[in-house]
Amino acid sequence: MNSHSYGRRQRPGRGRSRRRGGRGRFQDQRERTQAPKQKTFWQRIVAFFGGNSGSQRKPAGQSRNGQQQPHQHQAQQSQPREQRPQRKPEPIEVTSPRLYVGNLSFDATESDLFDLFNGVGHVQNAEVVSYRHNQRSKGFAFVSMQTIDEAKRAVEELHDKEFLGRKLVVSGAKSGEHSRD
């Protein structure tokens, strides 16, 4: 028994059209070139509002207000791009055992921080701040030391120290009332 005996249609083979004409997606080249190409909905909208249709372009050296502008590639060659001055983070005085660790490598884990800060003093807690939706590190963390003196020593020893390819920024964490702003 085959599938035709139960009234089922056979599925067309690969590359064949489901239409009876049998030409489907492999139409003759003559038919493709003879049919006028219609504009899409968005092309018609842009044409209606006077946008450039692709053939009308403003000269490259002229801006919207009519002033002559140098070509972009010429401007880039003549003037090297200025480097932005690096901004130093505001120094936060250590008033609690909680420390802020910034410029942290995205590969750093809490156990890495725990080991690093344990060399300076006793660490109570280390938490890397991460995004909720993908658990990727945001590049900073908080470390809680046992005492304020150990926290001050950790800032002195570990600030600007190279760790996993980046120079750490270690400072006192802002108090709890400011941290949620």
Image (tube, grey):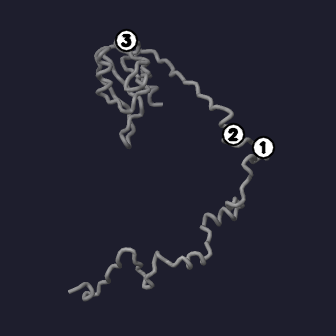
Q: Earlier in the sequence, mark 3 or mark 1?
A: 1
Question: Which amino acid lies under the numbered mark 3 shown in the image of this protein?
Answer: Arg
Give the labeled residue for mark 3: 153
Question: Which amino acid lies under the numbered mark 1 shown in the image of this protein?
Answer: Gln
Compare residues 51 and 11 and report the one nearer the observer. Answer: 11
Question: Which amino acid lies under the numbered mark 2 shown in the image of this protein?
Answer: Gln
Q: Quadrant of the N terminus?
A: bottom left
Estimate the spatial distance between the alpha carbons at disc 3 and disc 1, rounded to whole Å: 60 Å
Q: Is residue 144 above or below residue 64?
A: above
Give the labeled residue for mark 1: 68
Q: How many marks?
A: 3
Q: Position of residue 38 (x, y in %)?
A: 61, 72
Callout 2: few (<14), some (14-19), or many (20+) C-alpha neighbours within 10 Å? few
Give the labeled residue for mark 2: 74
Determine the secondary structure under disc 2.
helix
Determine the secondary structure under disc 3.
helix
Q: Is residue 52 left or right of residue 166?
A: right
| Disc number lying in front (3 or 1) | 1
Q: Quadrant of residue 13?
A: bottom left
